[in-house]
């Protein structure tokens, strides 16, 4: 604490340290809580994440790569919003991941599709919204081609949100502060009901005032959620839950190149928000989701589970949106830091998703071999209904220092596009024990898909019907009780429609692009250490327009986006130390294009390597106190499609502390930390949107503190 005497008295880190010290000294007889070591997705004893569809197979014995991030892990890292999850997972990258907007990720270098790569308790949802984490038990990731679980999706993987369900009598309360003025309060009430404990109810509520280090981004959000269970009989379980959420916050447009030149990140204040006009309005996300799940144990070996879900989203999407430097330079801001500014407004966007699934799971003996079978059907329906939108250039030019105020131009006369999508998917999975240490894993999914789009003025209508099958198979060998090797191969599918414009010779034509992935892996896990080493190779068909689309062109399949990489992880604990680290090396290239100038180019905004590591030390002399250090490293990214400009690599460090103690009936956890300890200035990512290059800076140094009480 002596070092804090030279700092301002209101420095959050000093406040945190002071609070920890005063609280600790107040405990005359501290009781050491049982240490819980969380190893995400690796430990042999931990269940496999359900995002892969193989139930409770231990992660260390599953022939695919998954990771699960619990509420405790998120709280230790100070993560309160989904778009911050990239700080934990090396395979998860930023892909136009703007503050105040919905999270946009990439996995294994492929940008995820917010309409198709997200699940909620295994059912498909639309992630074009702000997804609250407060009523989620875990966020699970599947790395790799996702055709095993999704009829259509971008390759790279899936994100699944596991909803909190009743577990027993417990009450948890949380309050937190994040610099420069964000405040959060949350409650989690878990209650057993009924004379025999045959029912349960879990309530989650949170409210948050948003005032981040980013300027002109003040807002608020809240959540109210309830989940209930009813044990109708020893064989029958009924579960229901509902969630209501709201977020209102201005979004963050990106910076950009200056006359095609990459500006020095150190010369840009990362706290500047270019969405700072007097007429700037917040982006508003309102969501309601409800689901019902029925599980019936048919006998000792067979179980039937049916679940249904409906999700309703209403968005007001608004921004003062910087875009280009006149007709001559649409991909960059001007060399003097000025830019064209557009008034963008799309009010009352309505997105409704419905899904119903049923799956029969069981064990059988056929041909002298043990089989673990699952037969499922999934029906999915999506409606996107929109009104007119504004995307109007305003008079004058903005500046990158955010100092210029310009007039609004809110006329909403642009025609939006309504979408309707329906799919029916049949799936079959089988885990065959060929011999006790050898298993064959088989998966097959058949999808029938109907899609319709039409502009709200009735023009440019498209309709397509497609059917396709995506297989998946793997072979695993348990080399020792702790070491497993596996090889897998699978396909995924994406569906697209050629723009229904008269300049396209194949306008409105539907197409299916099948990706394929091969993977080899080693996994090790014992009671102390877990590690994995995985090599993957993914091919994804690419398309391009041939000809001049101002007059006549054709959209054709043209080569592949080929991503080849290596993932490694190591986690474990010894004495008072706990380590959790992961890394990914990626070689991404365009191959097989008829345009030789595109071949061997690295896609933009894809890092060549990433590293995430965290080290925890439980102080022996002070039971309940642990000190944590973390590091993030991001390799070089390409900025332009011709690979003539790159973002330099960057590394940030973080420090945190956690102190746990017991009161008479309450368990307390006090957390404090600082992210980007050395206030590194660097460009975090360089997404290209609508042929314009944007630049997002690394978040500035940020302090945080929270207190949790569990009764």
Image (spheres, grey):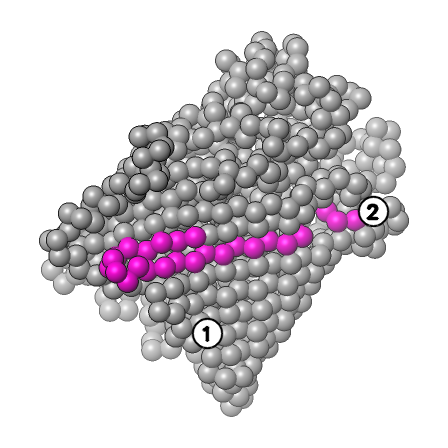
Q: Secondary structure at mark 1?
A: strand
- State whether residue 169 is above or below residue 637: below
Please state the horizontal and vertical placement of residue 305, each as a whole percent of the image. Answer: 39, 63
Please state the horizontal and vertical placement of residue 413, each as a whole percent of the image. Answer: 62, 17
Front residue of 611 and 499: 611
Determine the image quadrant of residue 409: top right
Number of residues whose C-alpha sits closer than 10 Å to that of mark 1, classed few (under 14), some (14–19) or many (20 or more): many
- State whether residue 95 is above or below residue 220: below
Q: In the image, which disc is placed on residue 536?
A: none
Query: Which residue is the site of mark 1?
Result: 525
Magenta stretch contains residue 676: no
- State whether residue 391 is above or below residue 593: above
Residue 562 horizontal side relative to residue 51, left or right: right
Residue at image point 34% right, 50% down:
657
Whole-number angstrom distance, CA of label 1 to CA of label 2: 43 Å
Mark count? 2
Tell me the magenta residue range.
601-629
Q: Secondary structure at mark 2?
A: loop
Residue at image point 46% right, 52% down:
630
Residue at image point 54% right, 69% down:
532
Query: Which residue is the site of mark 2?
Result: 598
Magenta stretch contains residue 623: yes
Front residue of 435 and 199: 435
Q: Nearer the viewer, mark 1 or mark 2?
A: 1
Image quadrant holding the N terminus, namely top left
Residue at image point 20% right, 49% down:
24
Residue 542 horizontal side relative to residue 231, left or right: right
**Of callouts 1 and 2, the N-terminal one:** 1
């Amino acid at each position: 604490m002596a070092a804090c005497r030279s700092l301002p008295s209101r420095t959050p880190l000093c406040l945190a340290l002071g609070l920890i010290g005063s609280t600790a000294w107040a405990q005359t007889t501290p009781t050491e809580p049982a240490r819980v070591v969380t190893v995400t997705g690796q430990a042999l004893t931990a269940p496999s994440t359900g995002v892969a569809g193989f139930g409770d197979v231990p992660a260390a014995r599953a022939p695919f790569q998954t990771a699960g991030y619990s509420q405790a892990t998120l709280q230790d890292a100070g993560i309160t919003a989904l778009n911050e999850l990239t700080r934990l997972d090396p395979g998860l990258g930023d892909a136009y991941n703007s503050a105040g907007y919905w999270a946009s990720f990439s996995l294994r270098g492929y940008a995820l599709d917010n309409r198709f790569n997200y699940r909620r308790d295994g059912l498909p949802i639309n992630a074009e919204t702000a997804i609250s984490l407060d009523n989620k038990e875990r966020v699970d990731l599947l790395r790799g081609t996702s055709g095993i679980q999704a009829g259509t999706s971008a390759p790279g993987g899936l994100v699944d949100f596991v909803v909190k369900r009743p577990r027993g009598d417990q009450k948890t309360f949380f309050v937190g502060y994040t610099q420069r003025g964000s405040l959060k309060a949350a409650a989690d009430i878990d209650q057993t009901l009924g004379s025999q404990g045959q029912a349960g109810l879990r309530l989650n509520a949170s409210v948050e005032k948003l005032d981040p280090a980013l300027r002109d981004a003040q807002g608020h959000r809240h959540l109210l959620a309830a989940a209930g269970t009813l044990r109708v009989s020893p064989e029958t379980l009924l579960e229901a839950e509902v969630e209501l959420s709201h977020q209102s916050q201005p979004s963050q447009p990106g910076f950009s190149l200056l006359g095609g030149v990459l500006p020095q990140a150190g010369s840009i204040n990362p706290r500047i928000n270019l969405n700072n006009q007097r007429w700037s309005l917040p982006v508003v996300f309102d969501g309601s989701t409800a689901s019902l799940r029925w599980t019936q144990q048919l006998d000792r070996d067979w179980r039937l589970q049916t679940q249904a879900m409906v999700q309703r989203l209403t968005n007001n999407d608004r921004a003062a949106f910087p875009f280009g430097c006149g007709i001559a330079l649409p991909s960059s801001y001007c060399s003097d830091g000025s830019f064209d500014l557009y008034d963008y407004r799309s009010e009352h966007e309505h997105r409704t998703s419905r899904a119903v699934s049923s799956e029969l799971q069981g064990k059988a003996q056929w041909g002298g071999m043990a089989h673990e079978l699952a037969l499922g059907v999934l029906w999915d329906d999506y409606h996107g209904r929109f009104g007119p939108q504004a995307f109007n250039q305003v008079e004058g030019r903005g500046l990158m220092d955010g100092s210029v105020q310009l007039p609004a131009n809110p006329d909403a006369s642009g025609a939006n596009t309504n979408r309707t999508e329906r799919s029916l998917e049949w799936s079959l999975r089988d885990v065959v024990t060929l011999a006790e240490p050898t298993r064959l894993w088989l998966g097959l999914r058949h999808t029938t898909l109907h899609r319709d789009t039409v502009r709200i003025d009735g023009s440019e209508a498209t309709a397509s019907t497609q059917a396709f099958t995506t297989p998946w198979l793997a072979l695993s060998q348990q080399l020792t009780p702790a070491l497993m090797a596996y090889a897998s191969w699978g396909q995924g599918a994406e569906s697209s429609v050629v723009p229904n414009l008269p300049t396209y010779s194949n306008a409105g034509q539907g197409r299916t692009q099948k990706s394929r992935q091969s993977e080899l892996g080693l996994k090790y896990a014992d009671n102390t250490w877990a590690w994995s080493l995985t090599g993957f190779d993914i091919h994804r068909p690419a398309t391009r327009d041939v000809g001049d689309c101002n007059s006549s062109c054709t959209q054709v399949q043209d080569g592949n986006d080929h991503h080849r990489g290596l993932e490694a992880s190591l986690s474990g604990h010894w004495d008072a130390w706990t380590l959790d680290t992961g890394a990914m090396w990626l070689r991404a290239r365009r191959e097989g294009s008829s345009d030789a100038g595109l071949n061997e180019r690295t896609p933009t905004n894809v890092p060549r390597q990433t590293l995430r590591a965290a080290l925890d030390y439980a102080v022996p002399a002070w039971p309940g106190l642990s000190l944590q250090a973390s590091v993030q490293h991001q390799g070089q990214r390409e900025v332009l499609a011709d690979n003539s400009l790159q973002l330099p690599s960057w590394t940030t460090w973080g420090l945190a502390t956690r102190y746990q103690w017991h009161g008479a009936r309450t368990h307390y956890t006090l957390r404090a930390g600082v992210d980007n300890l050395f206030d590194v200035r660097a460009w975090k990512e360089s997404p290209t949107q609508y042929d314009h290059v944007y630049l997002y800076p690394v978040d500035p140094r940020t302090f945080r503190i929270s207190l949790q009480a569990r009764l």
